[in-house]
Amino acid sequence: MASFGKFIKTERERKGWSQTEFGALIKINTPLVSRIENDKKSLALDKVKLLAEIFEIDYEKVKDLFFADKFAKDAYKYKCSESVFSAAEAQTKYLKEINITQGKLTF
Amino acid sequence: MASFGKFIKTERERKGWSQTEFGALIKINTPLVSRIENDKKSLALDKVKLLAEIFEIDYEKVKDLFFADKFAKDAYKYKCSESVFSAAEAQTKYLKEINITQGKLTF
DNA sequence: TATAAATTTACCAAAACTTGCCATTTTAAT
DNA sequence: ATTAAAATGGCAAGTTTTGGTAAATTTATA
């Protein structure tokens, strides 16, 4: 995967939509579509579900792409080490476990 | 690692500081220290360097912990799949490569 | 080539979130 | 019981995010 922006562009073109047509479907205007596709803005999280629907792709998959891209950009920007994601994975497992034993968590 | 908040609490106690003493060192007040230790607020990124210094821990290591915790909380909160971090890692490598071949990136 | 469509860029505003404070309450230690 | 330490409630300033309009540029087509 190149980036979430490129993913959107690829899928939009696969559907044969212009940025304007696509924008109407997810309710953002054309310039914003352009910026998103070029990774200059990010798609709002609450549009991800709708995006999956109009692209006819599994929502969980699109959501993962969305976050993987977001995490990667942060890790790149702040020059995290190679191991940051395995640490994050371990940490996520820990959060799931304490949720099982101690009930719902809120951050 | 339990969480970034718990990490701070552990290190602060190892140093024998109260939340107030510690807060004075990193220039935040006591209630905020409490919330950070209990993961109800997050430490501002620009305090991480100072944190590493006063704890006498390698900055890169603390920064990684900071981001791993942040990523993990997002992944947990939004119920990402198990594979989101390996996808993120691959994506980060991709960003580094295109940076080598195409120059600096800005998000 | 002229022009029309599509995309990108510049600039800006409103909304949402973050960071952090003060005042107060609760918990722990002596 | 008193004092120190920690936690919570509520709020304000500052920043970031989200997204818009207008204008410019690029691409495609008659």
Image: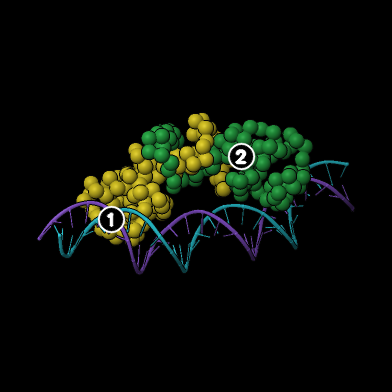
Chain colours: A yellow, B green, C cyan, D purple
Which image quadrant: the N terminus of chain B? top right
Q: Which mark identifies residue A19?
A: 1
**Callout 1 amino acid:** Gln
Is A88 or A4 nearer to us in this picture? A4
Labels 1 & 2 near each other (Cβ < 8 A): no
B87 versus B41 height, above or below: above
| Percent x, y of residue B60 | 59, 34
Is D30 or B4 nearer to us in this picture? D30
Number of residues whose C-alpha sits closer than 10 Å to that of mark 2, classed few (under 14), some (14–19) or many (20 or more): many
At x 40%, y 45%, the residue is A66
- The Cα–Cα distance between marks 1 and 2, rounded to whole angstroms, is 41 Å
| Percent x, y of residue A81 | 52, 32
At x 30%, y 51%, the residue is A53
A98 versus B43 height, above or below: above
Q: To which residue does mark 2 refer?
A: B4
Is residue A60 among the parts visible in the rendering?
no
At x 70%, y 50%, the residue is B28
Q: Is residue A33 left or right of residue B55?
A: left
Secondary structure beneath dot 2 equals: helix
> Residue C24 lies in what quarter of the image?
bottom right
Secondary structure beneath dot 1 equals: helix
- Say which chain tag 2 marks: B
**Callout 2 amino acid:** Phe
| Percent x, y of residue B30 | 72, 50
B19 versus A26 height, above or below: above
Camera-near label (1 vs 2) is: 1
Task: Confirm whether circles 1 and 2 share one chain.
Answer: no
- Say which chain tag 1 marks: A
Q: Which mark identifies residue A62?
A: none
